[in-house]
Amino acid sequence: PAKGGPLLKVDRLRKQFGGLVAVNDVSFTLHAGDIMGLIGPNGAGKSTTFNLISGVLPATSGRIELAGTPITGWPSRRIARLGLSRTFQHVKMIPDMTVLENVALGAYLRGRSGTLKAMLRLDRAEERQLLAEAQRQLGRVGMQHHLHELAGNLAMGPQRLMEIARALCSDPTLLLLDEPAAGLRLKEKQALADVLRQLRREGLSILLVEHDMDFVMGLTDRIVVMEFGTRLMEGTPQEVQDSPAVRAAYLGT
Ligand code: ADP
Ligand code: MG
C-alpha cells in the first residue's frame, strides 16, 4: 500500500490458552511507513499477539489483514512470502558460525522447508547468492565490519542487529521486532534506533514490542498499550505519556 495507507489491520484478535485469555479481542491498524510500538506489562499478551500476526500460533477468533489480504489462519511461511518478517524475544543463532553464515543460513531456511536433505543439495551458485544477500542485509544494519566474526563472540547490540539483518533477507515490507532493545547498553540502543529510523526512511514499516520507554517514545509514530490481554489505548507517544489510564496501569504513577 501507499505510504500512510493501512498495511496491517488487526480486528478483534483473540487467543485463549485453555481458560486463559492471552489476547482479548484486540484491534489496531498499522499504517505503511510507520514504526508502531506495542507496550504493556509482562504477561500483557504482546508476544502472543506477534505469534498470531506472524502465523506462529492460530488465533481463537478475529481477523488479520496484511496489505489488503486476509491472512487469518495462514501458515507463517505463506505470511512471510506476503512481506512479513519477524525476530523473536530471545536471539537465535549458531554461536560457532560467523555472522555472515548465520544470516545466510537464516535466509536459506526462510526460503525452504529446512530439511537436512534440502540443505545438502545447496549448490555453489546458490550458496554465493545467499552469502551476497546476507552481506547486503548486514550492510543495511551497519554490520559490514562484523561479517567474519563468530556470532557467539558478538556483544548484545550487534547480536540484535544480526537478527534484524536475517529478518530482512526475505525483503519484507513489515518487520515485527520482539524486544529488540532488551539488555542493550545506551550506545547500542541509540545505534539500533538509528538503524530502525533508516529502515523506515527506506519504506519499511515496523511493529515492535519494547519495555524501554525512552526508546519507544523517541522512535515510534504510534503506540498500542496492552494490559491483561486487552488494548488499553492507542495513540501517539505524547498521547500515551499523557494518558492517566496508562500512567496508572503501566507506568505506575
Ligand atoms: P508478554 O509478551 O506481553 O509478556 P505473552 O504474550 O508472552 O505476554 O503472554 C501472555 C499470557 O499468555 C501470559 O499469561 C502467558 O503465561 C500466557 N501464554 C503465552 N504463551 C502461552 C502458551 N503457549 N501456552 C499457555 N499460555 C501461554
Ligand atoms: Mg513477550
Image (cartoon, grey):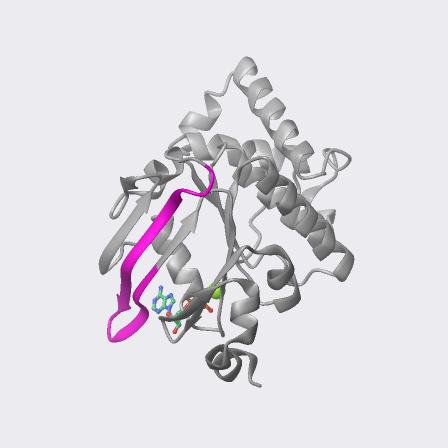
Q: Which image quadrant for residue 251?
A: bottom right
Main SS, magenta region, reads: strand
Taking depth in this image into account, of 163 and 236 the one nearest to the observer is 236
Residue 130 appearing in the image: yes
Q: Residue at x 34, y 54 (%)?
A: 52
Residue 220, image x, y percentages: 57, 56
Residue 61, image x, y percentages: 21, 59
Q: Is residue 199 left or right of residue 152?
A: left
Residue 237, image x, y percentages: 56, 64
Residue 179, image x, y percentages: 56, 59
Write down the region rendered in magenta: 3-27
Q: Which image quadrant for residue 127?
A: top right
Q: Residue at x 27, y 54 (%)?
A: 58
Q: Quadrant of ligand 1?
A: bottom left
* 88 to 136, vertically: above or below: below
Residue 245 is one of the magenta-drawn residues: no
Residue 5 is one of the magenta-drawn residues: yes
